[in-house]
Structure formats: structure tokens, C-alpha cells
Amino acid sequence: MTNQKVKPAEGKLGIMVVGLGAVTSTFMTGVLMARKGLAKPVGSMVEYDKIRVGKGDTKQYLKYREVVPIANLSDIVFGAWDVYPADAYHSALYAEVLKEKDIEPVKDELEKIVPMKAAFDKNFAKRLDGDNVMVGKSRWEMVEQLRNDIRNFKQQNGCDRIVVAWAASTEIYVPVYDPVHGTLAALEAAMKADDCEHVAPSMCYAYAALSEGAPFIMGAPNTTVDIPAMWELAEKTKMPIAGKDFKTGQTLVKSGFAPIIGTRCLGLSGWFSTNILGNRDGLVLDEPANFRTKEVSKLSTLESILVPEKQPDLYSDYYHKVRINYYPPRNDNKEGWDNIDIFGWMGYPMQIKINFLCRDSILAAPLLLDLCLLSDLAARAGRYGIQRFLSFYLKSPMHDYTQGEVPVNHLFQQYVMLKNALREMGGYEADEEID
Ligand SMILES: NC(=O)c1ccc[n+]([C@@H]2O[C@H](COP(=O)([O-])OP(=O)(O)OC[C@H]3O[C@@H](n4cnc5c(N)ncnc54)[C@H](O)[C@@H]3O)[C@@H](O)[C@H]2O)c1
């Protein structure tokens, strides 16, 4: 069954990524290799997952593409911005995530992806010092340049639609400041006044994307689109926004494991998560102001799954700590440890240890693909504003905190939200309940 309300995924889809680092180069290489049949897009739910539609006699299990029209990998064109001038081929080599044998077959295509000049401000990521940046531009001029970049890219590559995704370094923490972030008019005024404290460069990308009719995805923990001004813009331009922070390793485990403790009604006295990683992301996060952004995002997961107010006997007083340590020898191969102190019958303590030896960008690449394809779908389905159905992919899902909305962090509830949205867009009944 296809829903007439969703526009078909015809023509080329331009995926323009902010940041051409480890995640992005791994993502692009994988997509290009997959479309040549030289690699499998493992981890992409769009490519692999099947969901039930219909009930009883009409029950079927279908891939997402059979439920809703989703762009084909062969229709994707890549663009990027980065502070460093390396093209996607050299960036992939530099990142050392993939072996050369997995990069060389698509070398020619990767070399053509040359980053445009970044809208960058060193105060937001002190550890970076590349020179492929816009010089002497105010925040508003950055917006104008980025809008031009998007328009030119779209036209030069014959794209029908564009999606813009941030997979660039984590910026320093920008707390919500109502006089600037509260309304679209205030944000625009601040951009025009070149307010470099409250307007992060990432906000310029988001503003430019939404104004050019492109959905925007925030893959880092930046608060960029977590502000009422951006929701207003998304509403005005009828564009979807999704964020924030790809839910790849430790937080994926946390949001899938915490429900075991909660469902079984065991108590929690502490959860300590620590990591070592040595890629450029780790280097940036070694700076306390940048780590703060990540910490806020990572900490939010547990509190909405194991809720103290709902079960005071079990969760009233647990200690939750998250650490990231920069350790160059491991490069992109992050190692995470979780120590979970739980208690059971009559309060007797027990411990659970999880040691995840993961590959950061290998986990993030399929998330980026799915987020881009599903945001494009959402736009064609006429959905705009915060896309809660994409919470599954994100560490700190967007929610309207001005209305007291609590985000859904429980992995399996998020999966229900994803499936129901696909069913709905596919013209089926959204028939699964979240308790
Ligand atoms: N890999 C994961 O598991 C994972 C999970 C969640 C979030 N993330 C986030 O994804 C982002 C990318 O991670 P990565 O490992 O690819 O990092 P990376 O350091 O390899 O790449 C980031 C790139 O962004 C560029 N950049 C920084 N500021 C920019 C700007 N204003 N405009 C354009 N380019 C800019 C940098 O020059 C760098 O090349 C990080 O913010 C990271 O926290 C990654």
C-alpha cells in the first residue's frame, strides 16, 4: 500500500554534511562501496529491518522501502564543508577507520568530494586550526554564504532535494539563552548584530539549511536546533529537524540495558560510564567546555528511563557519572566500560560490568545514512518541526521542554515510535502502543 500523500523519492538527493572527518568519510565510502556491490550497509535499518504492517490475515513483514518511498543509494550525491581542506579520500585515509582496500575502489568518487569553506569560530572548538574557513564573516554573512553554497550545490549537481547533517566536531556548550534563542526574530537580530557568544556557527548551518528548504540533522550534542527559534523557523519553512547526538556505542547499550533493570524492578545505586578514544573527536572532547556539551547529552539518557519520582524505592538516589578520556593509541576504536551497581531483594547489592570494544565511526555511519534518508522521507511526507520518530537514533532526543515534554529515551519505546511513523506515512494503521 502506498500513501498518495507522500511524494515519491524521484531525482537526486544531495546529502550535504558539515564536517568531513572520521564519521562522514566512513559513511560516504560505505555508501559508494555498497552501491557498487562491494560492501554491505550493515547496521542500516532502512536497508535491513523489516516491520509488521497490517494485522490478522493482512499481516506482512516489509522492509522500510516497501512501506514508504525512500531514496535509493544510487540517487545520492555528497557534498561537505570542513575546516580542513582534505577531500573525502584523504580524509578517509587520515581517519584510519577503514583499510585502504575498502577505500581504493571508490577513490575517484571520494576525491571529487572537496569540502567547501567552513563557517567556523575557533572559540567554539579551540583544538582545531584548519585554514579552510570563511574569513572575516559575521554570523549573518556566514548564513548568506552557506545559503549560496547549498543553492549552488543543488544546481550544479542537478539535485531534486537536499538534506543537511552536522557530523562536525562538538562545539562548546551553549546554554539556551532566551533573549536570543527564544524567538526567530531574536535569533535573526542576534545574527545580524554578530552576537558570537550566543550564536554558534552550527546555528548558521541549521538556519541556512531550513531557509533553503532542506531538513537539518544534528549529529553532535550541540544545542543548535534545541531552541524555540529554530522550531519556529522549521515551522515557517515546513522542514523537519532531528537531533541530537548519534546514539552509537555506550548510550545505545545504556538505553537498551536500563529497561532490563527497570522492567525487572531492580534498584540502581550507581552507573559509572567511562571511555577511551583517540580520534579527532576525542581530541576536541578533551577540552572541558566541549566535553560539557557531550556530558549533558549522555547524562540525560538514564533519568528518563529509570525515573526517581515514579519508583522512589528503586531509583531515588543513584549516582550517574560519564567520562571520556582522550587516548591516542586507540584512534577510532573506542573502548567503553560501564559499571552498574544494582540492588535486589531486601536491598542486597550486585554489580554488572559491560566492556564494549567498539568502532565509533563504524557504528555512526549507518545512523547518519538512516537519519538522512528518513529526514528526506519526512519532508516529502509533509512532516515538519521536531521529528520525534527519529529519537531511536539519538542520544538526547529533541523535545519541547518549554511545554514540560519529557523525551523518550527507552530504546524499545523509541523503536515503536519509529515503526508507527513509518506505518502512518505508508498509509497503514499506527497500531503499536507505547506504555
Ligand atoms: N562516532 C560516533 O560514535 C559519534 C557518536 C555521536 C556523536 N558523534 C559526533 O559526530 C561528530 C563527528 O565525529 P568524528 O569522529 O567524525 O569527528 P572528526 O573530528 O573526525 O570530524 C569532525 C570534522 O568536523 C570539522 N569541523 C569542526 N567544526 C566545523 C565547522 N564549524 N564547519 C565545518 N567543519 C567543521 C573538523 O575539522 C573535523 O574534520 C562529533 O561531534 C562527534 O561528537 C560521533
Image: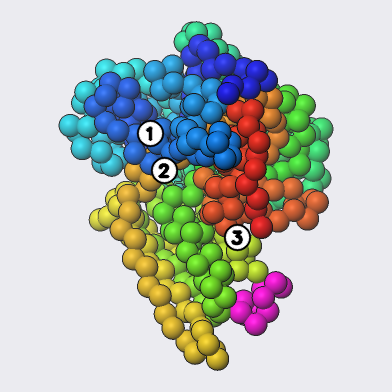
- Position of residue 306 relative to residue 293, above or below, is below
Determine whether the residue tagged by mark 2 lies in a helix, strand or loop.
Answer: helix
Q: Residue at x 37, y 48 (%)?
A: 360
Determine whether the residue tagged by mark 3 lies in a helix, strand or loop.
Answer: helix
The residue identified by callout 3 is 300
The residue identified by callout 1 is 27
Amino acid under disc 1 = Phe
Q: Residue at x 60, y 64 (%)?
A: 305
Position of the N terminus, as image quadrant, is top right
Magenta part of the chain: 308-322
Amino acid under disc 2 = Ala
Image position of 276 (left or right of 201): left
Q: Position of residue 434 (x, y in %)?
A: 65, 53
- Tell me if I can see residue 120 in this picture: no
Q: Residue at x 76, y 30 (%)?
A: 235
The residue identified by callout 2 is 364
Q: Position of residue 114 (x, y in %)?
A: 39, 21
Q: Mark 2 vs mark 1: which is more N-terminal?
A: 1
Determine whether the residue tagged by mark 1 lies in a helix, strand or loop.
Answer: helix
Residue at disc 2, CB closer than 8 Å to ligand 1:
yes
- Asked if disc 2 and disc 3 are in contact, CB closer than 8 Å, the reply is no
Q: Residue at x 44, y 21 (%)?
A: 72
